[in-house]
Image (tube, rainbow, N blue to C red):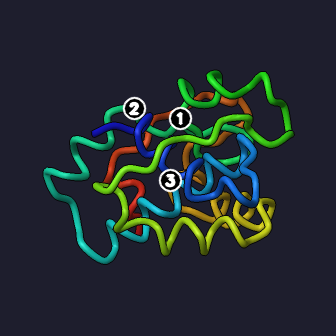
Amino acid sequence: MSMMELSKHVLNVGRNCGVTNLQLQKVMYFTLKDYLKDEGESEFIEKLYDKPFETWQYGPVVPDLYYRYSGNGSMTINDEGKYNNKYSIFDKAIKKYLSEDVFELVERSHQEKFWKEHQGENQERDEYTLDDIIGE
């Protein structure tokens, strides 16, 4: 289990509508947030969250995944991903967030306490813990 596998799952679930790098990051973040709020931390999530989000200009970003798909710019990622039954519990949230305007998701991520506290003028990139994702 890993964030890479989750990203591939998101790409597969969204393959018919196309997923941009920015969408991928926000969908992953809010999908995990929803799960954590409903279910709490677990061994499953701790194993999945092997690469943390960081506070970037457009909200939470997993750097390794961002750079992996950065060649696509703002265009749809040209990767159909891979469906993973372990992550089927996220499908409803993934579809929900893929249907939302990505810039509204960015704005919502900017309202999160951790992002507000750590995104200063110096643009340092601080890592989110699972508790930080759950938030208030």
Q: Mark 3 and mark 1 in contact? Answer it, CB < 8 Å.
A: no
Q: Mark 2 and mark 1 in contact? Answer it, CB < 8 Å.
A: yes
Q: Quadrant of residue 105?
A: bottom right
Q: Is residue 79 above or below residue 32?
A: above
Q: Earlier in the sequence, mark 2 or mark 1?
A: 2
- Give the alpha-carbon distance from disc 3 to disc 1, as whole Å: 15 Å
Q: Secondary structure at mark 3?
A: helix
Q: Secondary structure at mark 2?
A: loop
Q: Position of residue 115 (x, y in %)?
A: 58, 51
Q: Which residue is mark 1?
A: 62
Label 3 vs label 1, nearer the camera: 1
| In the displayed structure image, the side of residue 73 where residue 38 appears, left or right | left
Camera-side residue: 31 or 78? 78
Residue type indicated by callout 2? Lys
| In the displayed structure image, the side of residue 71 where residue 34 appears, left or right | left
Residue at 63 percent across and 48 percent down: it is 24
Residue type indicated by callout 1? Val
Q: Position of residue 100 (x, y in %)?
A: 73, 71
Q: Position of residue 116 (x, y in %)?
A: 61, 54
Mark number displayed over residue 105: none
Q: Position of residue 117 (x, y in %)?
A: 55, 50
Q: Secondary structure at mark 1?
A: loop
Q: Residue furthest left?
A: 43
Q: Which residue is mark 3?
A: 114
Q: Is residue 40 above or below residue 18?
A: below
Q: Residues within 10 Å of mark 1 (few under 14, many from 20)?
A: many
Camera-side residue: 21 or 107? 21
Q: Earlier in the sequence, mark 3 or mark 1?
A: 1
Residue type indicated by callout 3? Phe
Q: Quadrant of the C terminus?
A: bottom left
Mark number displayed over residue 51: 2
Q: Mark 3 and mark 2 in contact? Answer it, CB < 8 Å.
A: no
